[in-house]
Image: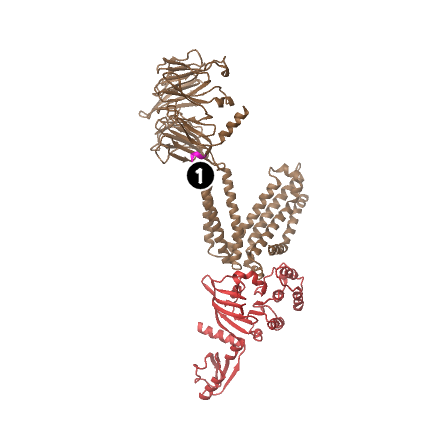
Chain colours: A red, B brown
Amino acid sequence: MSDSAIQIADLTVNYGRKVAVDQVSLSVTRGAVYALVGRNGAGKSSLVRCLLGQQKPEDGKVTLFGEDVWSRRSELMQRVGVVSEDADAPPEMSVAAIARFCARLYRKWDQESVEERLRMFGVPLNSRFGILSKGQKKQVSLALALANTPELLVLDDPTLGLDVVARKSLFEEVIGDLADRGTTVFITTHDLIGVETFADRVGMIENGKLVLDEEVDALKSRFRRIRFATDPAALDTTVMRPTVMRAWGGGAEAIVSNYDDIAFERIRSTSNIGAAEVQAMSLEEIFIAIAGGNQGRNE
Amino acid sequence: MRNALVIAAREFEEKRFVAYAAIAFAVLPFVILNLIPMSKGKSPAEAIVILAVILSSGFTVGLGVLTGASFIGDVSTGRMSFYFSRPLGAASIWFGKLLASIILIVGCFGIIATPARFLGGAWTGLWDITFTQLTVQILTAAIGSFLIAHVVGTFVRSRSPFIAVDFAATVVCGVAIWLLVMPLADGLAKSLVGWLLVALAAALIIAIIAGGLWQLERGRTDRRRGHLALSQFLWSVMAVALLIAAGFVSWVVSVAPSDLTRVIAWHAPGGQFLLLAGETRHRADYHAAFLIDVEDGSVRKIRGQSIREMRFSRDGNSAIAVSTAHGLSDLVVYKRGVAEPVETGLTLSPADPFFVSDDSSRIAVIGRGLLSVYDVAHKRSLLSVRVPGELKSYYRGSFVSPDLFRLYVASPNGVSVFELDLRTRGFQSTGAFGNTLGFTLNPGAQRMLVRQPGGSITLTDARTGAPIKVLSGGTAVFTARFLRDGRIAIVDEIPPKKPLLFATLGPRLHILSPEGVTQHDFQLEQSIGEASFVGDDGTRLVLRTATTGSRSPAEFRSRRLVALNLDRGVIERSEPGVFEWSIEVNADPRPPIQPLREVFYSDGAGRIVGWSPATGAKRVLTGGQEAKARREKIHHTS
């Protein structure tokens, strides 16, 4: 039995001449929560479609639980719950009818949990899916995705359209609970604050390339914002590599991607960099710093 | 399978409003009937039936197009990802949606057509077609529209440049089908063409259905990849189907004379050139025609479907086919030893008489009151003259030489003789003679035998029509002809007081000199009831004989060919077993140039057999079972 719930190797997706996903490789261990972040059009949805066996990549391979997802998609979907980016259920059908339809397709189906979650979300069962709000559609999709007690939950931008309360509920009550129960979660999102508390690993995709793939704790421990009271001209960039360096007040602000307490103290004691304040960074800040840095390099 | 049914049920549930619309359409004829007053004498039931048929066919075909086109729309709108993120195979999705669509189409037709179904009495008064036949036709059209709309929708919505390849493939398929159908249509194979088109349509349906599955399996939610998958599958299947069809058509058209079953044969006067035409074995209603050079055995297949008439030149070396299309006839000349036929470029109306010179180098045509002579090799008119206006009832003609054409024009007042001299470009009347039952010319066209209404034969000057000598010798003449050496052969009728079946003696054969002096007078045996000339080889005269004159079973049994020695009057050889005579085509009133080498007939097994009067040798040229069956039937009847 494979330790990886998801294994992506050299995945490449092209649309004509445009490379949407460029040789992406990543792995998600069973029970982990993986957050894939990226800007609009970065290639997240293409990657998710390949991950779910809905799209054949030009190159590379995706396996779920050690099995090739393209050829074994139908069987693997028994073990996977999916909340897609666009609410794709038939709009003419009532929520209850959609649930009944799905119930007939899965070997395991917990109808009570669906109804309970929908009650919790405040979505009426007899409503037509097409008239629900964007957020409600997402909630219905989530309720359905969880009804087969999936081993892997794939969430493609699940917070899109959700209000603050629903978003909080999604992250804290649902995904957090799933994570606690050992369900593997693969989530693409812009909401880094939401995933920060429970994501084990984070990946960042930009222009189709996976520019970051790291444990959240490790990532957060190596990124620091350092504010210098004066110009840190003496900062040894070979030891402390600033991702971003900009003026701040009378001094400067640097965001370093390889922060090390001991190394920084050694620099401070041996160099004339003056007063400096070291701050931890949130995932969102790191994401912005990396994206900004890459944009600068691309430009 | 279970999942396909689950999908079908879901799709059907989603589109149930279409069924409600169908119910409304079913009621519509009754509503319209109440709103619009009926014309006097019109039956309300008939009006309801007509409206129901119009609405049901329109609704059903329209529904087929819409559902087919919207099929791929589910991919475009991202709806297909709902299915593909479930544990559903592509086959379940495709066949589930397909099943739902077909049930919807059939169901809606059933709902709207119900009034027409239950007002069957009015139906029968309106149309020849039954309700079931119409149902099959409309549903076929609707489901066909559904499948085609799916393909077109896929191609268009993918917005892929590959659509240019699809367009090219469609054109290629269309051209290929046309090229496959034409040879069969040439062979009058109406049913075979129908089967071929049905088979190709079936291949197309299978290709679309299986291609749709392939499209979903390979493309899934990717429109372009789906388009590519469908295109590859569809055109591959159609290519294979067309290749198989091409192989089949090639096999059909590759018939040999031995494959002919219901054969009709025409042969040149000397027997050296033979046209066989008929149905073909194992090829349904495909007809084929062959020109066989009997001497060297070479066979050429010709387009026989449009040949209205086939003539042979007097020298027996050319066959002139009259092909008719769109009310006009074209003359094509096939020459022995020449592979390609000569298109004369001559177009004439079907009723226009034409005459061929001995070597087929020139053709005379009468049309629109003009007599024109054409040079075949140079495809040009040599001369045209106006034929006397009042004389247009019946024409016979003969090229006395390549530059001299003689025309016999029969009218109620008698026969007028004209000559057209191409060297002097003169057209003049040369003589006339009275009413006749028929006439033949001697080889040099100087004299002719004119058969008088009383049964006598008069030797006459062929150019002036002046009588030379009356040849009847006491009994009525049955038939008379010049032999190739200029002598005259006459066969008497059996006296009417002795009915054919009870006659103790056969007819008499008289051989006369070119001047009409009797040389031999032979009493033919009793078994020869009636005799007609086939030809002569200088030594023997070949007759077709039968004991009776009617096409009765007894007559069929008694048919035979006999070769009489011209000097001794005895039967040298006799060939029984003749079922049908082959047709000797010699439009020229003169005897053939070449001696008779072989006589052709159809035997009891339906085979065309060549018989040599000189040696008695027989050879089978083609075979078939049809005539055998007919013969057995005749025997059984008798």
Identify whether B296 is placed above or below A222. Answer: above
Query: Could you say whether the residue bearing mark 1 is in a helix, strand or loop?
Result: helix
Taking the image as shown, residue B336 lies to the left or right of residue A270, namely left
Closer-to-camera residue (B245/A65): A65
The picture places residue A145, in percent across and down from the top left corner, at 61, 65
- The residue shown at (66%, 69%) is A120
**Figure label count:** 1
Identify whether A67 is placed above or below B298. Answer: below
Kindly tell me whether residue A223 is visible in this rendering. no
Locate the C terminus of chain B by quadrant.
Answer: top right
Mark 1 neighbour class, 10 Å CA radius: few under 14, some 14 to 19, many 20 or more: some
Q: Tag 1, which chain?
A: B
Q: Is residue B340 magenta?
A: no
- The residue shown at (51%, 44%) is B199
Locate the N terminus of chain B by quadrant.
Answer: bottom right
Kindly tell me whether residue B105 is visible in this rendering. yes
Q: Residue flagged by tag 1: what amino acid is it?
A: Val
Q: Which residue is mark 1?
A: B253
Magenta residues: mostly which secondary structure? helix
Task: Report the residue that reaches farthest toward the left.
Answer: B423
Task: Report the residue that reaches farthest toward the right.
Answer: B34
Q: Quadrant of residue B30?
A: top right
The picture places residue B134, in percent across and down from the top left corner, at 60, 42
The picture places residue B629, in percent across and down from the top left corner, at 51, 30
| Magenta stretch, residue numbers | B249-259
The picture places residue A256, in percent across and down from the top left corner, at 48, 80
